[in-house]
Image (cartoon, rainbow, N blue to C red):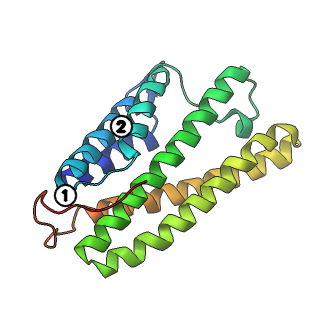
Amino acid sequence: MKESFTKIFTGFLLVFLEIHIVAFDILPDPLGYFLIYLGLERISSEYKIGNLSRIFAMILFALSLPTVFIQQTNNEITGLTANDGWLLYMSALGIGKLILVFYVFRVMIQLAQHVGDESILKRTEPTFKVYIVTLLIVTSVEPFLMNSGRDIGSVIGILLIVVSLIMEIFFLVLLHEFRKIEPEGLDGGSQQIDLQV
């Protein structure tokens, strides 16, 4: 489990961070999504968890390839003009990532329940709810910032960035904590966790 969650943690960290040198992203999102896929694939094969997280990870791997060469800028927040197609593409990536995180949280909750780690479970369930609700609100509000005044839009935009940043850090910390879980209650791949999502 440690190796699997190390890959998932590293993958989401690569997606979270964006550092461009000239036009090239030195921490490419596609690599991040591929690492997430590898971690989820291993969890699936070891613990027989059936879910859609691996499919979304691979879809996002393919969809995020252009971001290696084009800097991702939240144009609604910064007020910069951009092609409508690019804005739609970035919105789709954001929604796809939110769906992926939803399924990863489901995997984490099921693993914590099966192992019987009440401490990590009590942290995961409320974090799951707060993260999803918060990011849904952020995702819903962002499109309306284009039609708001520049000053008001900038203030709200900065607030959304800060809130999103805090939630991403909470999620990364939780993923890191899952690396420490000792799966004593799991007998290799012989036990199956019934997770049909």
Q: Nearer the viewer, residue 123 or 22?
A: 123
Work out whether mark 2 precedes mark 1 in sequence or the reverse, and give the earlier one. 1
User: What residue appears at the point 17 percent right and 53 percent down from the top-left corner?
Assistant: 46
Q: Can residue 20 be seen in this view?
A: yes
Contact (CB < 8 A) between labels 2 and 1? no
User: What residue appears at the point 72 percent right and 40 percent down from the top-left corner?
Assistant: 77
Report the amino acid beneath label 1.
Answer: Met
Identify residue for label 1: 1
Dot 1 falls on a residue whose secondary structure is: loop
Given this view, does label 2 or label 1 mark the residue nearer the observer? 1
Cα distance in 3D space between marks 2 and 1: 18 Å
Report the amino acid beneath label 2.
Answer: Gly
Position of residue 50 relative to residue 92, above or below, is below
Residue 58 is marked as: none
User: What residue appears at the point 65 percent right and 23 percent down from the top-left corner?
Assistant: 86
> Tag 2: Cα neighbours inside 10 Å, few (<14), some, or many (≥20)?
many
Q: Nearer the viewer, residue 114 or 134?
A: 114
Task: Report x, y in % for residue 142.
Answer: 73, 44
Q: Which of 10 and 152 is in front in this view?
A: 10
Residue 32 is marked as: 2
Q: Is residue 103 left or right of residue 154?
A: left
Placement of the N terminus among the 4 image quadrants = bottom left
Task: Report x, y in % for residue 24.
Answer: 43, 20
Q: Can residue 28 be seen in this view?
A: no
List the single residue furthest toward the bottom.
118
User: What residue appears at the point 39 percent right and 55 percent down from the top-left corner?
Assistant: 196
